């Protein structure tokens, strides 16, 4: 089975997705990509997937009131602790954004006018990108929950695609932070790439997300983005990585070519011909070496 490489960051805005997209461009012939940042997916902006296959994703349940059977007794309104029952005169309905699908209203309804139905929380896609490789990605519905389950489904589909196509890697763009979608992204991972920046919040959130990675006992490496904007904080990060045994994968300087690449709809390694491209190429070689060595053990 293809090793799973997950790219995460403790906070948003560190350049995680730009770096993941660049890695996918460097290994386009040999991987399947998965965008697991389902709450705010944006890797499609650079990779231009064709959305060849789209399927609704259901998770959890929502209560639905049959108006023909409802006698407007108000018992559902009285017991709903989430305030999901709306009343307009004698008409009772369910607010889908407030309903938690617990089923209590259906249980106490004297006429069995309420039933629970599967809730559509998003859509997942299997696409071919402009660079030719398969990308599995998804979009969580507005106000929807269960993002962790959608992430797990995206990863499952990506692994299946990699196995079917005989690819060597599954490259996952995870969510920022340490919440449920990040936990789901890390589950089953073979190697983690941490992307950070030399700021106070960057260091704080790097330590926080690495604590989560350590609980999963997954080997990790780190890329310091914009490493030259605060050399003192960069040194703090280097010392932390050394003390924790995290692989130093590379340090990217601040460079406006990153913005120019995004404006052009290209990955960094497609647009830049200098130190950014060379550093990312070296970092990807380091990642492959670590993953391939672990696979042989």
Image (cartoon, rainbow, N blue to C red):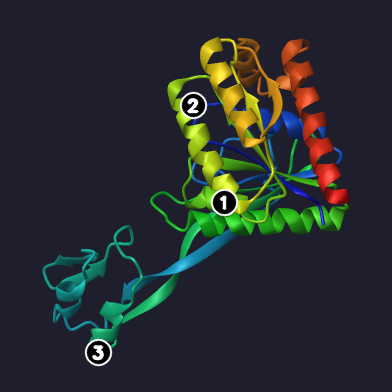
Residue 120, horizontal then vertical, whole percent: 48, 62
**In the image, residue 113 above or below residue 97:** below
**In the image, residue 116 above or below residue 39:** below
Please state which of the two labelled residues, at mark 1 or mark 2, is closer to the viewer. Answer: 1
**In the image, residue 277 above or below residue 105:** above
Quarter of the rendering occupied by the N terminus:
bottom right
Q: Is residue 251 left or right of residue 83?
A: right
Q: Are marks 2 and 3 in contact (CB under 8 Å)?
A: no
Please give the count of numbered marks on the rendered protein. Answer: 3
Query: Which residue was labeled with disc 1?
Result: 215
Which of pointers 2 and 3 lies earlier in the amino acid sequence? 3
Q: Residue at x 59, y 24 (%)?
A: 239
For residue 70, say whether it is visible. Answer: yes
Nearer to the camera, 205 or 235: 235
Residue 84, horizontal then vertical, whole percent: 24, 64
Residue furthest bottom in the image:
110
Residue 234, horizontal then vertical, whole percent: 57, 17
Report the Cα–Cα distance between label 1 and label 2.
Answer: 20 Å
Report the Cα–Cα distance between label 2 and label 3.
Answer: 56 Å
Query: Which residue was labeled with disc 2?
Result: 202
Q: Residue at x 51, y 35 (%)?
A: 207
The secondary structure type at the circle numbered 3 is: loop
Q: Circle 3: is it few (<14), some (14-19), or many (20+) Cα within 10 Å?
A: few
The secondary structure type at the circle numbered 1 is: helix
């Amino acid at each position: 089975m293809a090793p799973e490489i997950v790219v995460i960051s403790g906070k948003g805005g560190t350049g995680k997705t730009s770096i993941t997209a660049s890695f996918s461009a460097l290994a386009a012939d040999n991987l399947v990509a998965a965008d697991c940042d389902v709450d705010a997916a944006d890797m499609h902006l650079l990779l231009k997937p064709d959305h060849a296959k789209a399927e609704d994703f259901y998770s959890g349940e929502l209560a639905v009131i049959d108006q023909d059977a409802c006698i407007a007794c108000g018992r559902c309104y009285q017991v709903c602790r989430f305030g999901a029952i709306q009343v307009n005169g004698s008409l009772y309905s369910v607010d889908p954004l407030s309903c938690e699908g617990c089923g209590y209203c259906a249980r106490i309804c004297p006429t069995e006018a309420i039933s629970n139905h599967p809730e559509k929380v998003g859509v997942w896609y299997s696409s071919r990108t402009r660079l030719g490789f398969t990308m599995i990605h998804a979009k969580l519905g507005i106000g929807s929950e269960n993002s962790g389950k959608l992430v797990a489904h995206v990863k499952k589909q990506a692994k299946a695609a990699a196995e079917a196509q005989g690819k060597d890697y599954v490259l996952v763009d995870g969510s920022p932070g340490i919440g449920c979608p990040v936990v789901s992204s890390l589950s089953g991972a073979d190697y983690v790439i941490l992307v950070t920046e030399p700021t106070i919040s960057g260091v704080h959130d790097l330590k926080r997300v690495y604590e989560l990675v350590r609980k999963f006992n997954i080997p990790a490496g780190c890329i310091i983005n914009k490493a030259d904007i605060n050399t003192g904080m960069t040194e703090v990060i280097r010392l932390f990585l050394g003390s924790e045994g995290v692989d130093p994968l590379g340090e990217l300087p601040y460079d406006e070519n990153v913005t120019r690449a995004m404006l052009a709809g290209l990955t960094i390694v497609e647009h830049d011909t200098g130190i950014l491209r060379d550093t990312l190429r070296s970092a990807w070689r380091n990642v492959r070496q670590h993953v391939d060595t672990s696979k042989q053990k």
